[in-house]
Image (cartoon, rainbow, N blue to C red):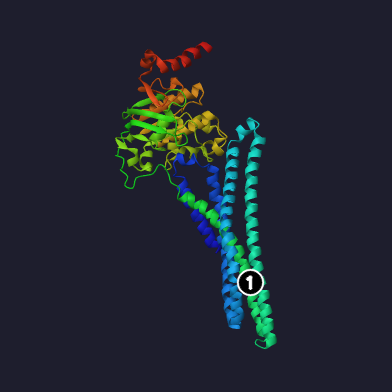
Amino acid sequence: MSILGERVVADIRKAVFDRMVGMSPAFYERLMTGEVLSRITTDTTLILSVIGSSASWFLRNALMFAGGLALMLVSSAKLSGLVLLIVPAVILPIVLLGRRLRVLSKETQDWIAQSSGAASESLLSVQTVQAYTHEAESRGAFGEVTEKSYVASRKRIGTRSVMTVFVIFFVFAGIVGVLWVGARDVRAGAMTPGELVQFVIYAIMVASSVAALSEIWGELQRAAGATERLVELLHAEDSVTDPAAPVPLPVPVRGEIGFDDVRFNYPSRPGQSALDGVSLTVRPGETVALVGPSGAGKTTVLQLLLRFYDPQAGRVTLDGIDLRAMARADFRRALALVSQDPVIFAATARENIRFGRPGASDAEVEEAAKAAAAHGFLTALPEGYDTYVGERGVMLSGGQKQRIAIARAILRDAPVLLLDEATSALDAESERAVQDAVQRLSEGRTTLIVAHRLATVKKADRILVFDGGRIVAEGSHDALVAQGGLYARLARLQFTEGLAAE
């Protein structure tokens, strides 16, 4: 049973993780990552405890109950009949209180998950928490959620205790009553003392089995609550799904991108339009820059292109095919992303770059790092490319993390390159080196560059100016500056005033 428990839990964990890692970002707007982790760890551990120990205990006591009951019937059918009359009084509290126990168990696990979510959020942002001397508030928030978890657990334990009291009272009250009837039968000569003692031994065996089974029932209800929470994740509806019969992406991928009257609101902000009737076409091999104030919809374009979300109206296409008609894994292989906040995994620098193409050789990894101006600082690390960079790359500066992310995108060698503020954390020298690398990389590739710093987009074939979720201007840097308007104002702020300040 212990081996079976380990097997079942391992399978459940894999199934839940497999499901969760494929869920779109919209799903995680409603559920904290820490809560998902709690379900994968705490809830499955609870199920393991039930299957591994409680199940074998249940089988043992169920066999003792069945065997003891059979021998009781053989010893005295009359007294056995009296014992069976008590059964409804024993089962009733098990059924009624068992339902409440299941609800309370689920509530307890929910609070434990919220506690894990609060802890995960604070610990992953520990530098910000400490920098703003927010430790006391974070401790208070975590303590409050943990205390609620304790209160819910106390209710569950109280309910289980009441159920056990009822069961044991009725079982042993029944035995006393049966003993009294048996003693009278012995005095009347209808039964020998030996037969009564034999019956009592079997009755105690059955009674102790019933008491144990009621305890196990409580554990099973607790596990049922945890199982419900895991089943919720396994059956969770995702707003973004692959079609039943996906259309294959043509090979080779040309990299033509199309937005056709796209309207989109984020699920968490349904009343606020992120893109409002955006139409654009990016020709194969063209470099297009998206500029505009924060919240104008630039990054949203990349998120829809990666199909993290689906638009409420209009369509997004790659090489003329609607993204919703293709399998996400198929068309995403044609895309390479460098995000504004580069993700660095708790692994070596080499493994972080190789994340872009797992089958790449060491030489290819190093070539990509050289192209991203990362080779110099990587070779200076204590163990070079094989240096462990810590969780979320804590050992690296912002610029170093960004260059590793760029090297990862270079190594992917995809026909479409997506750069979301890719050079925002770099110093002037590194930015120039990376811009040169990006320029080399973008040759023959379709490139979308999202940038606030206009110096990074001056060499783009075309610049699209976003404001309020719409494209308000389009053209080259010089043409847009000559037109006046939003782009000219942004350029003036960054170049003219910047030079005056210097």
Residue 303 appearing in the image? yes
Q: Position of residue 206 (x, y in %)?
A: 62, 73
Which residue is rendered at x = 62% and y = 80% of the image?
79
Up-down relation of residue 52 to residue 30 (above or below): below
Number of disc labels: 1
The residue most toward the top is 500
Where disc 1 sits, the SS reads helix
Q: Position of residue 309 (x, y in %)?
A: 41, 37
Quarter occupied by residue 196:
bottom right
Quarter occupied by residue 253:
top left
Front residue of this view, candidates 12 and 87:
87
Front residue of this view, candidates 63 and 87:
87
Which residue is rendered at x = 58% and y = 35% of the image?
125
The residue most toward the bottom is 189
Q: Residues within 10 Å of mark 1 (few under 14, many from 20)?
A: many
Quarter occupied by residue 207:
bottom right
Up-down relation of residue 272 to residue 177 (above or below): above
Q: Position of residue 395 (x, y in %)?
A: 57, 34
Q: Quadrant of the N terminus?
A: bottom right
Q: Which residue is mark 1?
A: 207
Q: Position of residue 164 (x, y in %)?
A: 64, 63
Up-down relation of residue 142 to residue 299 (above or below): below
Front residue of this view, candidates 151 and 173:
173
Which residue is rendered at x = 68% and y = 85% of the image?
186
Which amino acid type is shown beneath numbered disc 1? Ala
Residue 60 appearing in the image? no
